[in-house]
Amino acid sequence: MSTSLINYIELTLTACEPVDQNVDIISAYLSEFGFEGSAEDELIKAYLPEDQITEEEIKILVDELIAKGLCYEEYKIDIIKPKNWNEEWEKNYFQPILIGNQCLIKSSFHKTDLKAKYEIIIDPKMSFGTGHHETTSMMAEYLLEMDLTDKTVLDMGTGTGILGILTSMIGCRKVVGIDNDSWCYENAQENIERNNITNFEMILGDAGMLKPHLGEFDLVIANINRHILLTDIKYYVKTMKPGATMLLSGFYLDDLPEIEAECAKHGLVFQNKKMKKNWICAKFILK
Protein backbone atom coordinates (compact mmCIF):
# COMPACT_ATOMS: atom_id res chain seq x y z
CA MET A 1 0.00 0.00 0.00
CA SER A 2 1.07 3.58 -0.54
CA THR A 3 0.41 6.77 1.36
CA SER A 4 0.52 10.29 -0.04
CA LEU A 5 3.98 11.77 0.35
CA ILE A 6 4.40 15.03 2.20
CA ASN A 7 7.15 17.57 2.71
CA TYR A 8 9.42 17.26 5.73
CA ILE A 9 11.24 19.80 7.84
CA GLU A 10 14.96 19.11 8.11
CA LEU A 11 16.57 20.59 11.22
CA THR A 12 20.38 20.68 11.21
CA LEU A 13 22.23 21.21 14.50
CA THR A 14 25.86 21.03 15.63
CA ALA A 15 26.47 19.44 19.03
CA CYS A 16 28.87 21.01 21.52
CA GLU A 17 31.57 19.08 23.36
CA PRO A 18 31.42 16.37 24.66
CA VAL A 19 30.02 15.45 21.26
CA ASP A 20 29.03 11.79 21.81
CA GLN A 21 27.16 12.55 25.01
CA ASN A 22 25.45 15.67 23.67
CA VAL A 23 24.42 14.03 20.39
CA ASP A 24 22.62 11.33 22.38
CA ILE A 25 20.93 13.88 24.66
CA ILE A 26 19.83 16.09 21.74
CA SER A 27 18.55 13.09 19.75
CA ALA A 28 16.54 11.82 22.70
CA TYR A 29 15.15 15.30 23.39
CA LEU A 30 14.05 15.84 19.78
CA SER A 31 12.53 12.35 19.62
CA GLU A 32 10.19 13.37 22.45
CA PHE A 33 8.60 15.76 19.94
CA GLY A 34 8.45 13.23 17.10
CA PHE A 35 11.69 14.01 15.28
CA GLU A 36 13.57 11.17 13.61
CA GLY A 37 17.10 11.56 12.36
CA SER A 38 20.74 10.64 12.25
CA ALA A 39 24.09 12.01 13.32
CA GLU A 40 27.52 12.04 11.74
CA ASP A 41 30.15 13.16 14.26
CA GLU A 42 28.83 16.42 15.75
CA LEU A 43 26.30 17.14 12.97
CA ILE A 44 22.69 16.15 13.65
CA LYS A 45 19.95 16.08 11.03
CA ALA A 46 16.41 15.64 12.39
CA TYR A 47 13.18 15.30 10.43
CA LEU A 48 9.50 15.88 11.11
CA PRO A 49 6.50 16.23 8.77
CA GLU A 50 5.99 19.87 7.83
CA ASP A 51 2.39 19.87 9.06
CA GLN A 52 3.32 18.72 12.59
CA ILE A 53 5.38 21.69 13.79
CA THR A 54 5.95 25.37 13.08
CA GLU A 55 9.26 27.18 12.71
CA GLU A 56 8.42 29.17 15.84
CA GLU A 57 7.98 25.94 17.81
CA ILE A 58 11.29 24.62 16.45
CA LYS A 59 13.00 27.84 17.55
CA ILE A 60 11.70 27.31 21.09
CA LEU A 61 13.06 23.74 21.15
CA VAL A 62 16.46 24.78 19.78
CA ASP A 63 16.74 27.74 22.16
CA GLU A 64 16.28 25.28 25.03
CA LEU A 65 19.13 23.11 23.72
CA ILE A 66 21.36 26.17 23.26
CA ALA A 67 20.57 27.43 26.77
CA LYS A 68 21.68 24.06 28.18
CA GLY A 69 24.97 24.23 26.29
CA LEU A 70 24.13 21.17 24.18
CA CYS A 71 24.42 22.70 20.70
CA TYR A 72 25.75 25.82 19.03
CA GLU A 73 23.59 28.82 18.16
CA GLU A 74 23.98 28.27 14.41
CA TYR A 75 21.29 25.95 13.09
CA LYS A 76 19.37 25.52 9.85
CA ILE A 77 15.77 24.70 8.96
CA ASP A 78 14.99 23.45 5.46
CA ILE A 79 11.83 22.17 3.78
CA ILE A 80 12.54 19.01 1.81
CA LYS A 81 10.40 17.22 -0.71
CA PRO A 82 10.19 13.44 -1.34
CA LYS A 83 13.36 12.24 -3.06
CA ASN A 84 15.43 9.18 -3.89
CA TRP A 85 16.21 8.07 -0.36
CA ASN A 86 18.42 5.18 -1.50
CA GLU A 87 20.81 7.76 -2.92
CA GLU A 88 20.55 9.89 0.21
CA TRP A 89 21.39 7.01 2.56
CA GLU A 90 24.17 5.79 0.29
CA LYS A 91 25.71 9.26 0.34
CA ASN A 92 25.37 9.39 4.12
CA TYR A 93 27.37 6.24 4.74
CA PHE A 94 24.71 3.70 5.68
CA GLN A 95 26.88 0.58 5.50
CA PRO A 96 26.03 -3.12 5.95
CA ILE A 97 25.97 -4.22 9.58
CA LEU A 98 26.34 -7.71 11.08
CA ILE A 99 24.56 -8.28 14.41
CA GLY A 100 25.42 -11.21 16.66
CA ASN A 101 27.22 -12.91 13.75
CA GLN A 102 23.77 -14.08 12.65
CA CYS A 103 21.89 -11.13 11.16
CA LEU A 104 23.18 -9.08 8.24
CA ILE A 105 21.36 -5.82 7.51
CA LYS A 106 22.09 -4.15 4.19
CA SER A 107 20.43 -2.06 1.51
CA SER A 108 19.62 -3.06 -2.04
CA PHE A 109 22.40 -0.76 -3.26
CA HIS A 110 25.08 -2.44 -1.10
CA LYS A 111 27.64 -4.84 -2.51
CA THR A 112 29.21 -6.97 0.23
CA ASP A 113 30.79 -10.39 0.66
CA LEU A 114 29.36 -10.68 4.20
CA LYS A 115 27.01 -13.61 4.75
CA ALA A 116 24.74 -14.50 7.67
CA LYS A 117 21.97 -16.87 8.71
CA TYR A 118 19.44 -14.02 8.40
CA GLU A 119 19.92 -11.39 5.71
CA ILE A 120 17.59 -8.37 5.77
CA ILE A 121 17.44 -5.89 2.92
CA ILE A 122 16.39 -2.44 4.10
CA ASP A 123 15.97 0.69 2.00
CA PRO A 124 15.29 3.13 4.81
CA LYS A 125 13.91 6.31 3.21
CA MET A 126 13.47 8.59 6.25
CA SER A 127 12.40 5.88 8.67
CA PHE A 128 14.26 5.13 11.88
CA GLY A 129 16.01 1.79 12.14
CA THR A 130 18.98 0.76 10.03
CA GLY A 131 20.43 -1.48 12.73
CA HIS A 132 23.30 0.92 13.42
CA HIS A 133 21.70 2.60 16.42
CA GLU A 134 22.45 0.94 19.73
CA THR A 135 18.78 0.44 20.61
CA THR A 136 18.01 -1.40 17.36
CA SER A 137 21.08 -3.62 17.56
CA MET A 138 20.38 -4.57 21.20
CA MET A 139 16.80 -5.45 20.33
CA ALA A 140 18.05 -7.63 17.48
CA GLU A 141 20.56 -9.33 19.80
CA TYR A 142 17.75 -10.24 22.20
CA LEU A 143 15.61 -11.61 19.37
CA LEU A 144 18.48 -13.76 18.12
CA GLU A 145 18.70 -15.34 21.59
CA MET A 146 15.01 -16.30 21.67
CA ASP A 147 13.03 -19.27 20.35
CA LEU A 148 10.26 -17.56 18.39
CA THR A 149 8.93 -20.66 16.65
CA ASP A 150 5.17 -20.26 16.10
CA LYS A 151 5.05 -17.14 18.33
CA THR A 152 2.91 -14.04 17.78
CA VAL A 153 4.72 -10.69 17.88
CA LEU A 154 3.71 -7.03 18.29
CA ASP A 155 6.24 -4.48 17.00
CA MET A 156 5.36 -0.98 18.27
CA GLY A 157 7.09 1.95 16.54
CA THR A 158 8.07 -0.30 13.63
CA GLY A 159 10.21 2.19 11.71
CA THR A 160 11.84 0.46 8.74
CA GLY A 161 10.50 -2.92 9.91
CA ILE A 162 13.88 -4.49 10.68
CA LEU A 163 12.90 -6.03 14.02
CA GLY A 164 9.55 -7.39 12.91
CA ILE A 165 11.12 -8.81 9.75
CA LEU A 166 13.80 -10.50 11.86
CA THR A 167 11.19 -12.13 14.13
CA SER A 168 9.47 -13.53 11.05
CA MET A 169 12.73 -14.92 9.70
CA ILE A 170 13.52 -16.51 13.06
CA GLY A 171 10.22 -18.38 12.96
CA CYS A 172 7.32 -16.47 14.46
CA ARG A 173 3.84 -17.23 13.12
CA LYS A 174 2.48 -13.68 12.96
CA VAL A 175 3.80 -10.12 13.29
CA VAL A 176 1.71 -6.99 13.75
CA GLY A 177 3.59 -3.72 13.33
CA ILE A 178 2.22 -0.31 14.30
CA ASP A 179 3.72 3.09 13.50
CA ASN A 180 2.12 6.53 13.56
CA ASP A 181 4.39 8.00 10.87
CA SER A 182 3.20 7.63 7.28
CA TRP A 183 6.78 7.48 5.99
CA CYS A 184 7.58 4.62 8.36
CA TYR A 185 4.34 2.84 7.50
CA GLU A 186 5.01 3.00 3.77
CA ASN A 187 8.70 2.16 4.11
CA ALA A 188 8.02 -0.83 6.37
CA GLN A 189 5.48 -2.13 3.84
CA GLU A 190 8.09 -1.87 1.09
CA ASN A 191 10.76 -3.61 3.19
CA ILE A 192 8.36 -6.40 4.19
CA GLU A 193 7.68 -7.11 0.52
CA ARG A 194 11.36 -6.71 -0.37
CA ASN A 195 12.25 -9.50 2.09
CA ASN A 196 9.39 -11.77 0.96
CA ILE A 197 7.72 -11.70 4.37
CA THR A 198 4.08 -12.81 4.19
CA ASN A 199 3.00 -12.92 7.86
CA PHE A 200 3.67 -9.27 8.79
CA GLU A 201 0.68 -6.91 9.03
CA MET A 202 1.44 -3.17 9.15
CA ILE A 203 -0.99 -0.71 10.74
CA LEU A 204 -0.79 3.09 10.53
CA GLY A 205 -1.63 4.48 13.96
CA ASP A 206 -0.69 4.39 17.64
CA ALA A 207 -1.56 2.39 20.76
CA GLY A 208 -5.22 3.16 20.12
CA MET A 209 -5.08 0.53 17.36
CA LEU A 210 -4.45 -2.27 19.89
CA LYS A 211 -8.04 -2.91 20.99
CA PRO A 212 -8.63 -5.76 18.49
CA HIS A 213 -5.48 -7.55 19.72
CA LEU A 214 -6.15 -8.09 23.43
CA GLY A 215 -4.35 -11.15 24.85
CA GLU A 216 -2.91 -12.05 21.45
CA PHE A 217 0.87 -11.77 21.63
CA ASP A 218 3.70 -13.92 22.97
CA LEU A 219 6.21 -11.11 22.47
CA VAL A 220 5.90 -7.32 22.44
CA ILE A 221 8.82 -5.20 21.24
CA ALA A 222 8.82 -1.40 21.53
CA ASN A 223 11.84 0.66 20.55
CA ILE A 224 10.44 4.16 20.88
CA ASN A 225 11.32 6.71 23.60
CA ARG A 226 10.85 7.08 27.33
CA HIS A 227 7.86 9.42 27.14
CA ILE A 228 5.79 7.20 24.83
CA LEU A 229 6.77 4.02 26.66
CA LEU A 230 5.68 5.41 30.02
CA THR A 231 2.37 6.48 28.50
CA ASP A 232 1.65 3.31 26.53
CA ILE A 233 3.07 0.35 28.50
CA LYS A 234 -0.36 -0.14 30.10
CA TYR A 235 -1.85 -0.62 26.62
CA TYR A 236 0.90 -2.99 25.46
CA VAL A 237 0.36 -5.25 28.47
CA LYS A 238 -3.29 -5.79 27.56
CA THR A 239 -2.22 -7.41 24.28
CA MET A 240 0.05 -9.97 25.99
CA LYS A 241 -0.62 -13.59 26.87
CA PRO A 242 0.23 -14.74 30.43
CA GLY A 243 3.97 -15.42 30.57
CA ALA A 244 4.63 -13.32 27.46
CA THR A 245 7.84 -11.31 27.01
CA MET A 246 8.24 -7.56 26.50
CA LEU A 247 11.41 -5.94 25.16
CA LEU A 248 11.69 -2.17 25.65
CA SER A 249 14.33 0.21 24.34
CA GLY A 250 14.83 3.83 23.34
CA PHE A 251 15.80 5.19 26.76
CA TYR A 252 18.86 5.72 28.97
CA LEU A 253 20.17 3.96 32.06
CA ASP A 254 18.93 6.82 34.26
CA ASP A 255 15.41 6.19 32.94
CA LEU A 256 15.37 2.49 33.80
CA PRO A 257 14.01 2.80 37.39
CA GLU A 258 11.02 4.79 36.11
CA ILE A 259 10.42 2.27 33.30
CA GLU A 260 10.70 -0.63 35.76
CA ALA A 261 8.27 1.01 38.17
CA GLU A 262 5.68 1.55 35.43
CA CYS A 263 6.07 -2.03 34.22
CA ALA A 264 5.68 -3.38 37.76
CA LYS A 265 2.33 -1.57 38.07
CA HIS A 266 1.03 -3.73 35.27
CA GLY A 267 2.40 -7.12 36.31
CA LEU A 268 5.64 -7.06 34.32
CA VAL A 269 8.68 -8.53 36.06
CA PHE A 270 12.13 -7.22 35.12
CA GLN A 271 14.45 -9.99 33.90
CA ASN A 272 17.66 -8.39 32.63
CA LYS A 273 19.03 -5.67 30.39
CA LYS A 274 21.60 -4.86 27.73
CA MET A 275 23.44 -1.54 27.59
CA LYS A 276 25.40 0.26 24.86
CA LYS A 277 26.64 3.84 25.19
CA ASN A 278 24.22 4.38 28.09
CA TRP A 279 21.24 3.25 25.94
CA ILE A 280 19.21 0.44 27.52
CA CYS A 281 17.23 -2.51 26.20
CA ALA A 282 15.27 -4.21 28.99
CA LYS A 283 13.48 -7.56 29.09
CA PHE A 284 10.29 -8.11 31.12
CA ILE A 285 7.95 -11.10 31.63
CA LEU A 286 4.23 -10.81 32.30
CA LYS A 287 3.26 -12.69 35.48
Image (cartoon, grey):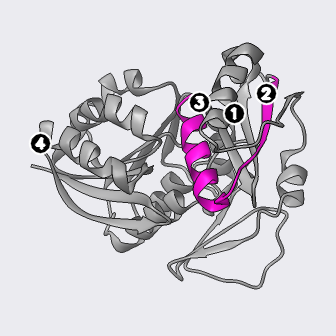
Would you say the residues marked 2 and 1 are in contact, meaning their CB atoms lie under 8 Å apart? yes
Whichever of callouts 3 and 2 sits on the residue coming sooner in the sequence is 2
Query: Could you tell me the amino acid type at mark 2?
Result: Tyr
Give me the C-alpha separation between circle 4 and circle 1. 34 Å
Residue highlighted by disc 2: 8
Using residue 222 as the reference point, say whether residue 53 is left or right of it. right
Residue highlighted by disc 1: 183
Q: What stretch of residues is rendered in magenta?
A: 7-35
- Percent across and percent down for residue 71 are 70, 43
Q: Badge 3: few (under 14), some or many (20 or more) residues near its Cα, within 10 Å?
A: some
Q: Badge 2: few (under 14), some or many (20 or more) residues near its Cα, within 10 Å?
A: some
Residue highlighted by disc 3: 34
Whichever of callouts 1 and 3 sits on the residue coming sooner in the sequence is 3
Query: Could you tell me the amino acid type at mark 1?
Result: Trp
The residue mark sitting in front, 4 or 1, is 4
Circle 3: element type: loop
55 lies above or below 254: above
Query: Could you tell me the amino acid type at mark 3?
Result: Gly
Numbered mark located on residue 210 in the image: none
- Percent across and percent down for residue 200 are 50, 45
Quarter of the picture holding the N terminus? top right
The residue mark sitting in front, 2 or 1, is 2
Circle 4: element type: loop
Residue highlighted by disc 4: 267
Does the stretch in magenta take in 172? no
